[in-house]
Image: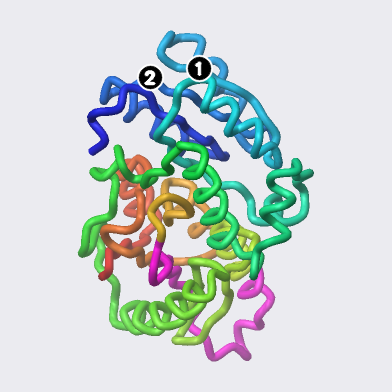
Amino acid sequence: MNSHISKLGLIAGNGHFPFLLLEAARAHGLDVVVAAIKEETDPEMDARAATDEHVRVHWMSLGELSKLIETFQREGVTKAVMAGQVKHKQIFSAIRPDWRLAKLLMNLRTRNTDMLLGAVARVLSDEGIELISSTQYLEPMLAREGVLTHRAPDEQEQADIAYGLQVARGIAGFDLGQTVVIAAQACVAVEAMEGTDATIARAGALFRTLDEGESTLRRALTVVKVAKPNQDMRFDVPVVGVPTIQTMREAGATCLAIEAGRTLIFDQAAMVAAADEAGVTILGVR
């Protein structure tokens, strides 16, 4: 734990993750300087800062790497964390990079997320700002190994998990995505830039188009979500929560396998309760 620091920089993406990390950092007595991304961060971040004099928010666009560095340096930030998703399509199509980010993009060998964020981390380090693990203050939220719900996976779901882990770890190794959706040991959907929930929804939509009489596939989906083989815990850590279960329920998915120790569960009690109500089983795997 970086207990010797008194101030933390928070690069905030979308969703609830930045707020959870903010609360955890404040619980450790840290002042927090938030770099809020105009295209992603919930505007509620301003309201949160208004209630706490130890939280300062600076808004900037996704492509303003120089402004990010200058803001953190001016605020005296030497340790920073990334929290919250930045949509992959935003990273590679929607941003208007400043000169520093444009130079960085031109020098990338491949334009995947790991390569880009790793390069950003190196630039920050060169400027005296160390990017630390996004789970630094959230370790109790990491998934444990074993069955997390009342119901355990049945024999068919176990087979789908085993196959799904092979496929998911294969695509994760190429930094294509972290999630696959399986049925009867057949791969129905693979995540790319659209994100986990969209992948699950796409699998559900595909299954709804199959003719019940002609399909040999069992009408239930298993979702497998893993970390990358060499997951950099500073960014793009797998995250699940109640919305994951809601999306699965709508898609007709009955089983979720996540990687224990390397997947964050947001509001685990509520997520497990939602899964039990929906008849969904959740399994933490190694």
State the extent of the magenta-drawn residues as a range.
205-231
- Residue density around tag 1, few if under 14, some if 14–19, many if 20 or more, within 10 Å: some
Q: Which residue is mark 2?
A: 31
Does 143 appear in magenta? no
Total numbered circles: 2
Residue drawn 61% across and 75% down? Answer: 207
The stretch drawn in magenta includes residue 226 = yes
Q: Under tag 2, what secondary structure? A: strand
On screen, residue 257 above or below 131: below
Residue 109 shown left or right of residue 147 in the figure: right
**In this picture, is 202 found above or below 162?**
above
The circle drawn on residue 56 is 1
- Answer with the quarter of the image where residue 211 lies: bottom right
Per the picture, the main secondary structure of the magenta-coloured stretch is loop
Question: Disc number at residue 20?
Answer: none
Q: CA distance from mark 1 to mark 2?
A: 8 Å
- Give the quadrant of the C terminus: bottom left
Q: Is the residue 57 above or below the residue 184 in the image?
A: above
Residue 46, image x, y percentages: 57, 18
Give neighbour class at mark 2: few <14, some 14-19, many 20+ (Cα, 10 Å): many
Give left or right: position of 5 versus 119.
left
Q: Is residue 87 left or right of residue 162?
A: right
Question: What residue is shown at x 23% (from left), y 63% (from top)?
Answer: 147
Task: Please say if the residues under marks 1 and 2 sit with CB atoms less than 8 Å apart.
Answer: yes
Write the residue at 29% across / 76% down: 154
